[in-house]
Image: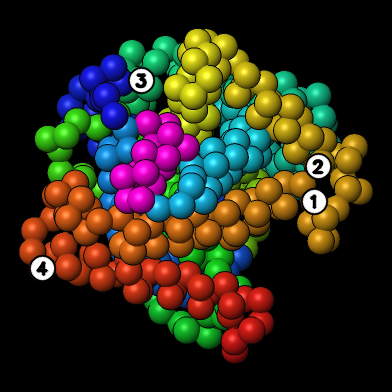
Amino acid sequence: MDSSKRSHWSSRWAFILVTVGSAVGLGNIWKFPFMTGTNGGSAFVLVYLACVVGIGVPLLMAEAMLGRRGQGDPVDAMRSLAREAGASRLWLAIGYIGIVGALLILSFYSVVAGWILEYTVRAVGGFRGMDKAMLGEVFAGLLADPLRLVAWHTVFMALSAGVVLGGVTAGIERANKIMMPGLFAILLVLLGYGAVAADLPAAFRFLFHFEPKAIDAQVVLAAMGHAFFTLSLGMGAIMTYGSYLGREISIARTSLVVATADTLVALLAGLAIFSFVFAQGLEPAAGPGLILQTLPLAFSTMPFGDVVGLLFFVLVVFAAWTSSISLIEPATAYLVEHFSLGRRAAVLLVSLLVWLLGVAVALSFNDWSGFKVFGLGLFDLLDTLTSKIMMPLAGLLIALFTARVMQRAHVESEIGLGGRAFGLWYGVLRYVSPVAIVLIFLNVIGVIG
Ligand code: PHE
């Protein structure tokens, strides 16, 4: 396929930056801490780390590799790869699952990012003088207010669409070049502050002092789903970003850098957040409201809490924003390349669709809270469907396609791994990842104990 017409990142570092930008998001700073809090602390962390190393990293390499070799949006890339391998068109499912999944994720991601925008604005005034009950009311009040939720969701979607409209290098790459260094700088400041003024040792114990009691099938599935979510796997984002990657760049090495950075950010943010939580004697298992109810309480009393609080929420906005653009890009690329739509029309169409579904998510917290499927509200339903079903399924298919359908020589020439390392990676994709994913599934649905 002619790749000369497609945009390309300006350098290897640009690819690393945008991919870290996609990976580091609400998953690291909102979801990871609250899931750790509700799934038994260190037990969850350990399984999550094992899933990142054993399943996540090999798949990250595979997905980026498929994108670069396929040179297209997720569906077209899979079409040319399946053709090259003489395989069935059914493998295009990888592309479709990714594109649809990304839009489903973004619909609730944007609503949560909207909460963060509201808290960023509140943080400008500081949280001084607010006690636990008041902060609880603020969060409950926000969830109960459909107009506010929809307004912030709209703002966030506009911000994200605005960047994607700018295109691959002038939009996505530039936004990441500004926000990602800012994010790392703020994270270091927060961590330093946590070490000096909060309870870093308690946070350390909570995250790393291993107590196996809490590991059960649900924790394992949640941790695996989170490994997929946090590395942006299976949703076409990595594949699309990989398709803009120059041929001379080693996919294996860059993927390792990306996964390491993503994991570090989650652990460091977790340490900072829990050091604030424990220093104030707060509850780690507060759920999705953890960074919104519990943290502002810490900010309301600690020294320089106003500055730290504002920095924190700016950090989360940056993280969410650089991820949401990677959720819009796959469907946009698909519409542009497949239906020859202009980029602007494609971005608008995609954003409008996501916005509509997001409105339903916003309403599911209040006016439509009676609507439940399998006992789950729309928000939990979309989260469960994507993280625990669609992402592992796409991951399974990617592993099988790479290591069992594509010609080994093609894979080997594309991935940039030598001898033994290649054998190891290939073997993991061929046997370990698919078996692990299937076993975790079977275990959860109760087929095996
Ligand atoms: N990895 C992002 C996060 O942690 C979420 C995401 C998932 C982004 C899938 C793109 C694709 O917040």
Mark 1 or 4, nearer chain start: 1
The stretch of residues the image draws in magenta is 72-86
Whole-percent x and y of residue 279?
49, 57
Depth check, front residue: 264 or 104: 104
Residue 377 numbered mark, or none:
1
Amino acid carrying label 2: it is Phe
The residue under label 3 is 168
Q: Given contact means CB atoms under 8 Å apart, are the residues at marks 2 and 1 in contact?
A: yes
Q: Can see residue 384?
A: yes
Q: Is mark 2 within 8 Å of ligand 1?
A: no
Mark 3 or 1, nearer chain start: 3
Whole-percent x and y of residue 111?
66, 34
Look at the image and tell me in which quarter the N terminus lies.
top left
- Count every numbered label the image shows and give the total: 4
Taking the magenta stretch, the answer to whether it contains residue 208 is: no
Camera-side mark, 3 or 4 = 4
How far is disc 1 from disc 4 in space, using C-alphas?
Answer: 47 Å
Mark 2 or 1, nearer chain start: 2
Amino acid carrying label 1: it is Gly
How far is disc 2 from disc 4 in space, using C-alphas?
Answer: 51 Å
Task: State which quadrant residue 428 falls in.
Answer: bottom left
Q: Residue furthest front?
A: 86
Q: Residue at x 81, y 42 (%)?
A: 365
How far is disc 3 from disc 4 in space, using C-alphas?
Answer: 35 Å
Q: Residue at x 79, y 56 (%)?
A: 376
The residue under label 2 is 365
Q: Is mark 1 within 8 Å of ligand 1?
A: no
Whole-percent x and y of residue 206?
45, 69
In the image, taking residue 24 as reference, residue 331 lies left or right, namely right
Residue 420 numbered mark, or none:
4
Q: Residues within 10 Å of mark 4 (few under 14, many from 20)?
A: few
